[in-house]
C-alpha cells in the first residue's frame, strides 16, 4: 500500500490537520462498517487507530467531560428515572 492509499503519517500532520483527518474518518466510519469491503474496513480501522493514537499521544491530559464517564452516565440515568 502506498502513502497515497494510507494518507500522510499521523505524526507528520500538524494539530489542525490531525483534527481534520479525525473528523473525516469518524464521519465515514459508519458507512464503511456497513457497506465497505473487508479490505476497506481493515484499512479504515488501521488509519483510524493511527490517527487516534497520535491524538492521544499529543494530548494525554485532554479535556474530559464528566458526562462521558461511568459516573456521569449513571447520574444521567438516575435523573431520567426521577423524571
Image: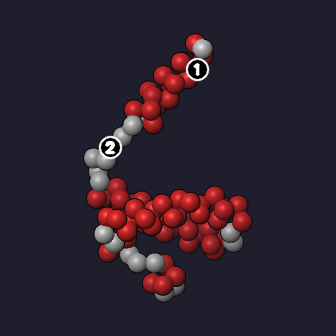
- Distance in Å between CA atoms under marks 2 and 1: 25 Å
Q: Residue at x 35, y 59 (%)?
A: 55
Tell me: 67 left or right of 45. left
Find disc 1 in the rendering and name its residue. Answer: 80
Is residue 49 shown to the viewer in this render?
Answer: no
Residue 70 position, x and y percent, is 46, 31
Query: Does 81 sit above or below residue 44?
Result: above
Residue 65's image quarter? top left
Q: Earlier in the sequence, mark 2 or mark 1?
A: 2
Q: Quadrant of the C terminus?
A: top right
- Identify the image's colour scheme: rainbow, by chain, secondary structure or one colour: secondary structure
At mark 1, the secondary structure is: helix
Residue 59 position, x and y percent, is 29, 54
At mark 2, the secondary structure is: loop
Residue 49 position, x and y percent, is 46, 62
Find disc 2 in the rendering and name its residue. Answer: 63
Query: Does 2 sit above or below residue 20?
Result: below
Residue 72's image quarter? top left
Residue 13 position, x and y percent, is 34, 72
- The residue nearer to you, when weighing 11 against 80, is 80
Query: Does 10 sit above or below residue 59?
Result: below
Amino acid at each position: 500500500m502506498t502513502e497515497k492509499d494510507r494518507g500522510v503519517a499521523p505524526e507528520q500532520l500538524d494539530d489542525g490537520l490531525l483534527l481534520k483527518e479525525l473528523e473525516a474518518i469518524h464521519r465515514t466510519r459508519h458507512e464503511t462498517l456497513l457497506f465497505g469491503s473487508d479490505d476497506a474496513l481493515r484499512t479504515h480501522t488501521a488509519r483510524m487507530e493511527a490517527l487516534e493514537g497520535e491524538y492521544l499521544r499529543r494530548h494525554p491530559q485532554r479535556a474530559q467531560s464528566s458526562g462521558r464517564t461511568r459516573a456521569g452516565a449513571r447520574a444521567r440515568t438516575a435523573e431520567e428515572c426521577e423524571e
